[in-house]
Amino acid sequence: MKRKNDRGFPDRSAIVAFIKANPGKVGTREIAREFGLKNADRIELKRMLRELADDGTIKKKRHKVSEPDALPSTLVADITGRDSDGELIASPTEWDEVESGEPPKILIVMPRRPKPGTAAGIGDRALLRVERSDENEGPAYRGHIIKVFDKTKSRILGVFRSLPEGGGRLVPVDKKSADRELNIAAADTHGAQDGDLVSVDIVRTRSFGLASGRVKEKLGSVKSEKAISLIAIYAHDIPLQFRPAAEREAEAAEPANLKGREDWRDVPLVTIDPPDAKDHDDAVHAQPDPDPNNRGGFIVDVAIADVSFYVRPGTALDRDALDRGNSVYFPDRVVPMLPERISNNLCSLVPGEPRGALAVRMVLGPDGRKRSHSFHRILMRSAAKLNYAQAQAAIDGRPDDTTGPLLDPILRPLYAAYACAKRARDERDPLNLDLPERKILLKSDGTVDRVVVPERLDAHRLIEEFMILANVAAAEMLEKKSLPLIYRVHDEPTLEKVHALAEFLETLDVPFAKGGALRPALFNRVLAQLEGHDHFPLVSEVVLRAQAQAEYSAENYGHFGLNLRRYAHFTSPIRRYADLVVHRALVRALGLGEGALPDSETPESLGEVAAHISVTERRAMKAERETVDRLIAHHLADRIGASFQGRVSGVTRAGLFVKLAETGADGLIPIRSLGTEYFNYDESRHALVGTRSGTMYQLGDVVDVRLIEAAPIAGALRFELLSSSSETAPRDRRRPGPQRRPSFKAHPGRSPDKKRKPPKQKSGKPKKGKGKNKGKGGGQKGKAW
């Protein structure tokens, strides 16, 4: 029975019950239909839903509402154990315990006759179709296996440590298994020497004592940086070798020709990439629009390597590409999504060579807004291969032998078109978090030479903006043709994170309007207000941490960071499987020939693909970050006792994380080493506050530290504090009276009043910052957008 109040409007409990009974499918329209509400009732319904969301009874995500932290209908989960009846139990792979508490349990429902690829056991990772359980007892969710990703590992990566009596021990590189050494008999060392990085097969386990293993492969000495990336590759199960069938398909591939293509070989498209780029999969060209009705407008061409022509659905190449999901970039190597014959040869837009491409031609008005677009399957010939600094130097009046002849006919029109497009971008006002990215430069022997921060140039922004325009055009075209696609989505920050940010900014006397609709401009105003101030890096970091993480989805809920209603990745099919799917969909939608998206692909099946490649993307980001940490820890291992300047990059109950200015390396100052008094963790301030002296160490503080310990295999550094900007800043030592908040206008490092009651502690740890997004077309640099 549908319960209603005296006014004939459904009461709160009835609406909540309906939401719980229909997870992931409910919005205002569905609720109104269920309870027979008229248009005049919509305002009251929205008000009630807003109240339910504010008090945490429901969770609101754009136009959909659900139970708080209700699981999506499709997700990736890890099978962690069995219940008392022997049934498998799983937990979501991606779950924020700080924000959402303990992860929910999922009971795996196994059919009598499992389909191939769905047999699973403890330790496996699987893609599940999830639904609410009808049982009153046991896990709240039931899951049906769609696909198993990772099989239980019987091989472990670690460092071999020899023993005087022969044989040795394996010290696993996985931090979670670091205390579970394996015994290696003398006959099973496979010639491994002390300090070698090896992979070991477990040959016997014991109830008591050490398990035994046999060295399967030697990967080199851990003293060589060339072995460091292998740790992440093996630790995260990143496929290193292609299947023989995929290699054969790649070798048999023929170069594209004019068959079924438009001839664009006379269009002077150019590639602009980093100087060390291995492949070149996007090229650009621009010219003033000759249409008299569009004076001041431009025609912009973006041509992308036609990977879908070579990698057909269902082939061995396709299976390998989907398994990998994306290329992974390390300082010393690239683990590509596709074999070198495809990525570095047939699909690399090298100058002077005919190459197949999928191109979008966009007409921009004088206001920078896109007026129209069209897609073409073409044969092109790149006019030049440029790097960012080279293109920028030419525009700044320093052309070289390559850019001199290109300056007037190609480069100046490109920059003029970018200046035009920037007007629309500035009006759109996307999230302006242009944080610096560090890059590790290696010597010829693979050791670290130095860490640099490449200068951000208009050449970078030009390419990024054109790629974003092309990505939007692809999403619009596929929506117009009613074809399923994989969107790149980025949700708005949660209400809890917005409140936490507002509380933090209040401690700096920085106003932040929490009411009304969330827009990137709200955060941009805060950043603009503090630009050039000491607190700017700190606030930038906190604003970044308040943002959601971008992902792939077959359901569109927009891109908050870029302030776009629809967005898809189209511009890098060599290194991202999502872009390959979008290319195939465009080929099918526009009847462009071979390599089209199969008719069997549905939003549901693409939702499974999106969930998988979101996981592989996060896997790549984590592997890249860990490798950088290990490389820099190895580089600093012989500088124990040296002093460095850095900035507090994280605050937890365990202590202060510090990022060094010189290298960008992160390390920990344990809380026990800060002094003799007790320190409280103030979550709202992102600070540790001494209960006796009022000394405060806060996120963003400039500190001088001494390196005490370096653990290269773990990628960990430990520091001791020498001095801090918060210690040298004036402090408010007044006796009880009106409280004064530290003001960024006067004393950036001022501590709270000495007699102020320590803030109530909250459970959990603050989240760390996001990873980097390699390449172009993914939004702004430094965010995984």
Image: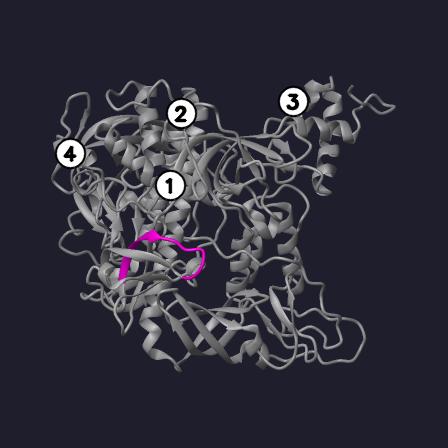
Q: Which of disc 1 and disc 3 is earlier in sequence?
A: 3
Magenta-highlighted residues: 197-209
Q: Which of disc 4 and disc 1 is earlier in sequence?
A: 1
In percent of width and height, residue 34 lies at 70, 19
Say few, some or many: other residues with alpha carbon within 10 Å of mark 2 (under 14 / 14 to 19 / 20 or more). Answer: few
Q: Residue 741, can we see it? A: yes
Q: In which quarter of the image is residue 486?
A: top left
204 falls in the magenta region:
yes
The quadrant of the image that shows the N terminus is top right
Task: Indicate left or right for 440 with 128 as reference.
Answer: left
Task: Indicate left or right for 505 with 597 as reference.
Answer: right
- The disc labelled 4 sits on which kind of residue? Arg
Q: Which of disc 2 and disc 4 is earlier in sequence?
A: 2
- Mark number displayed over residue 248: 4
As helix, strand or loop, the secondary structure at mark 3 comes to helix
Q: Which of disc 1 and disc 2 is earlier in sequence?
A: 2
Say few, some or many: other residues with alpha carbon within 10 Å of mark 4 (under 14 / 14 to 19 / 20 or more). Answer: few
User: How far separated are the C-alphas under marks 4 and 3?
Assistant: 52 Å
As helix, strand or loop, the secondary structure at mark 2 comes to loop
- The disc labelled 1 sits on which kind of residue? Lys
Whether residues under marks 4 and 2 lie with C-beta atoms below 8 angstroms apart, the answer is no
Q: Which of marks 4 and 2 is in front?
A: 2
As helix, strand or loop, the secondary structure at mark 1 comes to loop
- Mark number displayed over residue 30: 3
Q: Which of disc 3 and disc 2 is earlier in sequence?
A: 3
- Mark number displayed over residue 655: none
Residue 225's place in the image compared with 477, above or below, is below
- Give the labeled residue for mark 1: 151
- Give the labeled residue for mark 2: 115
Q: In which quarter of the image is residue 727?
A: bottom right
The quadrant of the image that shows the C terminus is top left
Q: Which of marks 4 and 3 is in front?
A: 4
